[in-house]
Amino acid sequence: MKTKIYFIRHGETSWNVEKRYQGWTDIELSEVGVKQAKLLGERFKNINVDKIYASPLKRAFETARQIGENTGVDVVIDESFKEINFGEWEGVTISELTEKYGDEYLKFFNTPWATTFPGDGSFKNVESRMAKGIDRILKEDKGKSIVIVSHGGLLKILLLYVMGLPQDFYKKVWLDNTAVSLIEVNSEGKPLLRILNDKSHLDNM
């Protein structure tokens, strides 16, 4: 029996457009983000969903709520899937961080797994937090169809963890706002990436 895990990034926020680090800052969806979330929810009308987990941050929860309304499934808040905490970097743009911190920031940007940063401190710390959540789901929700609505950085770490991919793959993949990805895990625990970064529900926006 296969376990299906749909992992989805939240809808657009104003800080996404401005290229600001969001982290734990609780930014709401933009007008565009709300429309994206509604279209995402409609996409799931005819998809079997047993459980929906979401980050507690508004942008993720509100996105997940649209799926819940279209499937009749309640959204469960899970702290394991909260975004990476970037501390004093939050609210600051990439160009501003480059100007202020120079090589220190560029080292993180280019080799994030090998570099410390404010807030959570390291990707290994984030992975440890996230792993507790996904390991629990794979055990308790085995054979079910699961949706996880979270954040770009966190979900890329989840992808690497579940698929057993090397750390440098983090820089090679991008997850768009409300894009759908799907991993199937068979009864032996072997994962298969079925869908990656599919945003076809936004084609008519």
Image (cartoon, rainbow, N blue to C red):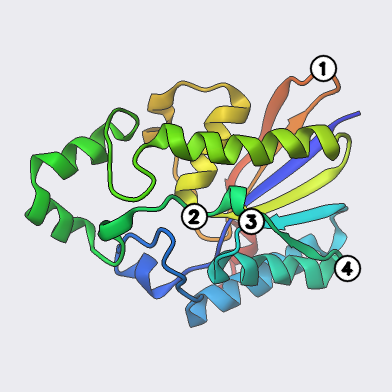
Q: Earlier in the sequence, mark 1 or mark 3?
A: 3
Q: How many marks?
A: 4
Q: Type of residue at label 2?
A: Asp
Q: Earlier in the sequence, mark 3 or mark 4?
A: 4
Q: Earlier in the sequence, mark 2 or mark 3?
A: 3
Mark 1–mark 2 contact, CB under 8 Å?
no
Instruction: Say which mark, if any, is on residue 176.
Output: 2
The quadrant in which residue 200 appears is bottom right
Viewport quadrant of the C terminus? bottom right
Mark 1 and mark 3: span between their CA atoms? 25 Å
Q: Type of residue at label 3?
A: Val
Compared with 105, 62 (above or below) is below
Residue at screen point 38% across, 65% down: 16
Q: Type of residue at label 1?
A: Glu
Mark 1 and mark 4: span between their CA atoms? 30 Å
Give the residue number, with chain letter if any, for mark 4: 72
Mark 4 and mark 2: span between their CA atoms? 25 Å
Q: Position of residue 195 (x, y in %)?
A: 65, 40
Instruction: Say which mark, if any, is on residue 149.
Output: 3
Q: Position of residue 189 (x, y in %)?
A: 77, 21
Viewport quadrant of the N terminus? top right
Mark 2–mark 3 contact, CB under 8 Å?
no
Give the residue number, with chain letter if any, for mark 1: 188
Q: Earlier in the sequence, mark 1 or mark 4?
A: 4
Between marks 1 and 2 in the image, the one whose residue lies nearer the viewer: 1
Please give left or right for residue 133 compared with residue 13 in the image. right
Mark 2 and mark 3: span between their CA atoms? 12 Å
Q: Give the camera-side residue of 154 and 14.
A: 154
Compared with 122, 203 (above or below) is below
